[in-house]
């Protein structure tokens, strides 16, 4: 008889929840006719956090991907009019990536889709349970949990 592995069970539950979150978010994005992939969505959200248009290398570092992956994402977003490449005024060899008006509109729709997906996912929880979950997730994300000796 095998003994239960509580950490393994938690890890499996987290993976299942992650897959459910992605499925529900994708459904909400599809319902709004948002023609972006999850990776493109992440790039748009990242772009929105910069004060001035970042370099491709900055985006790759922030997204923790190889520069070629950013090039592919930007190519797709540029083709659909959501971003544009712009030369760096101080260095002609550097390309900056800017959100277009279409990109900003898409970002607003993406935020709405994510918000409605979160409401659906969190619906079974009370307000207090949501607060506790938020604290627990912050602890896991930040890695501040006390390590056993």
Image: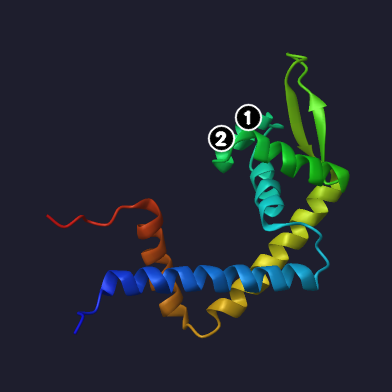
Q: Nearer the viewer, residue 57 or 50?
A: 57
* Place of residue 42 in the rendered image (x, y in percent of width and height, measured from the top left): 65, 51
Q: Is residue 149 above or below residue 137?
A: above
Q: Is residue 71 left or right of residue 4?
A: right
Q: Which mark is residue 57?
A: 1
Q: Position of residue 94 (x, y in %)?
A: 72, 20
Q: Badge 1 local density, few (<14 within 10 Å), some, or many (20+)?
A: some
Question: As rendered, which of 126 and 10 lies closer to the eye?
Answer: 10
Residue at the far left: name it: 149
19 vs 110: above or below: below
Give the image quarter of residue 97. Answer: top right
Disc 2 designates what residue? 61
Instruction: Decide if residue 25 is on the left or right side of residue 88.
Output: left
> For the residue labelled by badge 1, is the local secondary structure a helix, a strand or a loop?
helix
Q: Position of residue 5 (x, y in %)?
A: 25, 74
State yes or no: discs 2 and 1 in contact (Cβ < 8 Å): yes
Give the side of residue 136 with respect to residue 80, left or right.
left
The quarter of the image holding the N terminus is: bottom left
Decide which of 16, 102 is in the foreground and name it: 16
Q: Position of residue 45 (x, y in %)?
A: 67, 49
Name which quarter of the figure residue 147 lies in: bottom left
Q: Residue at x 81, y 48 (%)?
A: 103
The residue most toward the front is 1
Dot 2 alpha-carbon crowd within 10 angstroms: few under 14, some 14 to 19, many 20 or more = few
Label 2 – label 1 distance at C-alpha? 6 Å
């Amino acid at each position: 008889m095998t003994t239960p592995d509580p950490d393994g069970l938690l890890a499996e539950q987290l993976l299942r929840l992650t897959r459910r979150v992605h499925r529900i978010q994708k459904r909400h994005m599809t319902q709004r006719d948002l023609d972006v992939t999850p990776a493109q969505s992440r790039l748009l959200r990242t772009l929105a956090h910069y004060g001035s248009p970042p370099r491709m290398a900055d985006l790759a570092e922030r997204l923790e991907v190889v520069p070629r992956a950013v090039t592919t994402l930007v190519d797709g977003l540029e083709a659909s009019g959501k971003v544009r490449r712009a030369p760096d005024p101080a260095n002609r060899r550097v390309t900056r990536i800017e959100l277009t008006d279409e990109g900003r509109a898409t970002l607003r729709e993406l935020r709405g889709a994510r918000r409605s997906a979160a409401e659906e996912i969190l619906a079974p929880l009370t307000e207090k349970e949501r607060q506790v979950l938020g604290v627990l997730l912050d602890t896991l994300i930040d890695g501040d949990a006390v390590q056993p000796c």
